[in-house]
């Protein structure tokens, strides 16, 4: 409370931050003492009889208290210096230990602090000895059955204290980022837990020299200033729509072009989406950056590709603070719908810390909750619950922007036996040979796609009945293609190269605002928000790597992908019918022509093309890294 400047902050937010802080502190306390507790339970009465055990206990308690106190002391100083809690990036100060230690000694009462620390250790030692002495003299015997109950109860209570949640996800650092005000979020964090949570990402900084070297190539491609480093691009409209259109973004789980009959799948897997596609603006060469849900959610929201080699950027507490387009929908009600918990992959932090006044709807917040599987309620109920909220806003003439994240078209593919006029295909009605023709690995995968197809249609029907269909721009995109078998009906070259899993549908359905057409530009996930927001004619400032695909001046387009299936991680760029790929560590490069029938490396035959694509690829890669840590809100 002394270091955090909470003047003018709502009491409700302060209270929430304080309660979260208590939960983090409980988790840390239990983790700290868990080894000693287990040792005590195992040693039983011998723990109080043998002096060596007592000495080990005293040493452990004094050590853990001093270590924790040091963490908090450094956290106070770090926050006082940078207004952020202690995290793994603080280790950079050790790179020049001499200077850092000198600054420390000259800025703080270090010697007095060391004396105080030693005094603190003595006090803890005396207290620890007192506790051990008290229980050593306790002679009351406890029956084995009673003792077993004590042991089990203690173990379960401490385990629950570490999990610290009654939801399907444990307490995570991302829950602290519930407020638009970063001061409140910082106050909720626990420095020890936060330090180790961020420790896995300590080496994920940007190489400034490489960034500056390749920035000009990307600047030319994205029409950015060449003489100075700036990603800011203001987009304004002379004329706007008389009535603000609603915008609804729908992420289609595990949906690639290969899973849709519209794009050539021989099975009738998506008749409803096929029909919607024909009435929509559709992008035939659209690619997601990383083949994973968390990576695609992060990229679509922030406008930055997920190129993290360790986990996903959404799990990196140092990179979630971004200036995004979603936050700039002035006068709009902002909503996020997910069938399960927003704690999944720390997505809550990405949404809530970056979007002011966002309302999150997740498990526990819906009127009707029939949990289908690990992902929460199924897509039918998710769309139904979303429609209830959007219908209320429509009745109040309140424009809205919503993000709906589907999940049923994902293992375990929990599809109902009947839902209105939807029936799953039974094993007795289809052969494995037919499934293989469509590339589906299982009947469950096919039924999952068919169920999503049914639910998308029903969602639009509900929107028509609720009255917001006509004035809404519906934006649909896949997050990645689910795992499939051979795809003889599609471009085999893409599948061979490992980029077909990135090739997903992207279509915008809004008969009032956009005419049906096919756009053959290369497009990428970070282009979704700039494109849809421009159709809605909402003024915004773009700080991201995405662009409006309908901008007539933006013709020289490309797609940027992160490849995971090569053993060694790699990045690639798709442009002008070519695919250029470079591994992250060994820097092995390949250049392929996507329109030829053979898998041949053209880098030796086309050195200039390879060099141009290499510069663009490096520009994308290093600029993404740069923006992770240099695109923070003011």
Image (tube, rainbow, N blue to C red):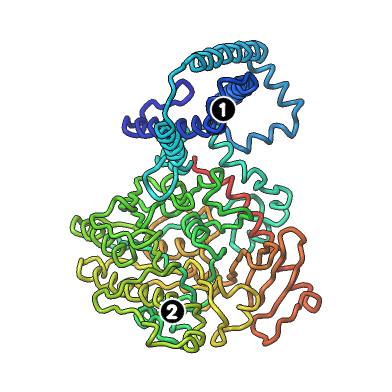
Query: What residue would you read off at disc 2?
Result: 443
The residue lying at 32 percent from left, 76 percent from top is 454
Quadrant of the snapshot with the N terminus? top left
Sort mark 1 into few (<14), some (14-19) or many (20+) by Cα contacts within 10 Å: many
Question: Which residue carries the number 1 mark?
Answer: 75
Whether 342 is drawn above or below 123: the answer is below
- The tag earlier along the polypeptide, 2 or 1, is 1
On screen, residue 81 above or below 170: above
Quadrant housing residue 262:
bottom left
Drawn side of residue 398 relative to residue 599, left or right: left
Residue at the image position 58 percent from the left and 70 percent from the top: 557
Q: Is 540 situated left or right of 384 in this image?
A: right
x%, y% of residue 347? 46, 51
Crowd around label 2: few <14 · some 14–19 · many ≥20 (10 Å): some
In the rendered image, the vertical position of residue 62 relative to residue 215, given as above or below: above
* Relative side of 156 to 594, left or right: left
Between marks 2 and 1, how big is the CA–CA gap?
A: 53 Å
Q: Is residue 428 above or below residue 612?
A: below
* Secondary structure at numbered mark 1: helix
The residue mark sitting in front, 2 or 1, is 2
Task: Say which of 148 and 245 sits in front.
Answer: 148
Decide: marks 2, 1 in contact (CB < 8 A)? no
Is residue 398 something that shows in the picture? Answer: yes
Q: Kindly identify which numbered label has been placed on residue 485.
A: none
Q: Secondary structure at mark 2?
A: helix
């Amino acid at each position: 409370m002394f270091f955090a400047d909470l003047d003018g902050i709502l009491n409700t937010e302060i209270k929430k931050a304080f309660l979260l802080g208590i939960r983090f502190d409980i988790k840390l306390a239990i983790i700290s003492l868990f080894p000693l507790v287990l040792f005590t339970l195992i040693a039983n009465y011998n723990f109080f009889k043998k002096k060596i055990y007592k000495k080990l206990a005293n040493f452990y308690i004094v050590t853990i208290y001093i270590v924790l106190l040091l963490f908090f002391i450094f956290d106070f100083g770090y926050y006082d210096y940078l207004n952020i809690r202690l995290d793994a990036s603080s280790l950079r100060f050790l790179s020049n230990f001499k200077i850092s230690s000198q600054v420390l000694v000259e800025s703080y009462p270090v010697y007095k602090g060391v004396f105080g620390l030693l005094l603190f250790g003595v006090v803890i030692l005396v207290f620890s000895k007192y506790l051990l002495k008290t229980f050593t003299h306790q002679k009351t015997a406890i029956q084995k059955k009673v003792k077993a109950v004590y042991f089990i109860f203690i173990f379960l209570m401490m385990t629950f204290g570490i999990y610290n949640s009654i939801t399907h996800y444990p307490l995570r650092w991302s829950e602290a980022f519930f407020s638009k005000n970063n001061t409140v979020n910082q106050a909720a964090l626990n420095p020890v837990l936060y330090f180790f949570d961020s420790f896995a990402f300590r080496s994920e900084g940007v190489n400034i020299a490489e960034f500056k070297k390749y920035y000009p190539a990307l600047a030319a491609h994205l029409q950015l200033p060449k003489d100075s480093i700036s990603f800011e691009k203001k987009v304004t409209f002379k004329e706007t729509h008389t009535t603000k259109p609603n915008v609804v973004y729908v992420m289609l789980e595990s949906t690639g072009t290969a899973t849709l009959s519209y794009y050539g799948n021989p099975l009738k897997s998506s008749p409803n989406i096929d029909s919607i596609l024909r009435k929509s603006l559709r992008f035939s060469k659209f690619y997601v950056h990383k083949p994973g849900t968390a990576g695609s959610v992060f990229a679509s929201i922030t406008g930055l590709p997920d190129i993290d080699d360790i986990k996903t950027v959404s799990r990196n507490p140092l990179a979630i603070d971004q200036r995004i387009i979603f936050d700039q929908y002035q006068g709009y009600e902002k909503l996020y719908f997910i069938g399960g918990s927003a704690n999944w992959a720390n997505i809550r932090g990405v949404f809530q810390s970056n979007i002011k006044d966002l309302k999150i709807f997740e498990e526990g917040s819906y009127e009707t909750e029939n949990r289908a599987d690990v992902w929460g309620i199924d897509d039918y109920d998710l769309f139904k619950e979303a429609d209830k909220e959007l219908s209320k806003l429509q009745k109040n003439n309140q424009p809205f922007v919503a993000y709906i994240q589907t999940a049923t078209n994902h293992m375990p593919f929990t599809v109902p036996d009947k839902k209105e006029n939807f029936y799953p295909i039974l094993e007795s009605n289809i052969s494995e040979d037919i499934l293989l023709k469509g590339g589906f690995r299982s009947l469950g995968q096919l039924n999952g796609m068919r169920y999503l197809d049914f639910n998308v249609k029903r969602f639009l029907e509900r929107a028509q009945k609720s009255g917001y269909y006509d004035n809404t721009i519906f934006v649909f995109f896949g997050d990645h293609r689910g795992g499939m078998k051979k795809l003889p009906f599609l471009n085999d070259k893409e599948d061979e190269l490992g980029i077909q899993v990135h090739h997903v549908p992207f279509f915008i359905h809004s008969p009032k605002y956009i005419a049906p057409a096919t756009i053959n530009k290369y497009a990428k996930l970070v282009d979704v928000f700039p494109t849809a927001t421009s159709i809605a004619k909402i003024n915004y400032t773009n700080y991201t790597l995405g662009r409006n695909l309908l901008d007539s001046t933006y013709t020289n387009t490309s797609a940027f992908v992160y490849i995971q299936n090569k053993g060694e991680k790699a990045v690639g760029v798709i442009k002008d019918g070519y695919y250029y790929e470079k591994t992250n560590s060994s820097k092995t490069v390949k250049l392929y022509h996507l329109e030829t029938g053979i898998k041949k490396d053209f880098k030796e035959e086309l050195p200039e093309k390879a060099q141009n694509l290499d510069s663009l690829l490096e520009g994308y890669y290093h600029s993404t890294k740069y923006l992770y840590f240099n695109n923070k809100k003011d």
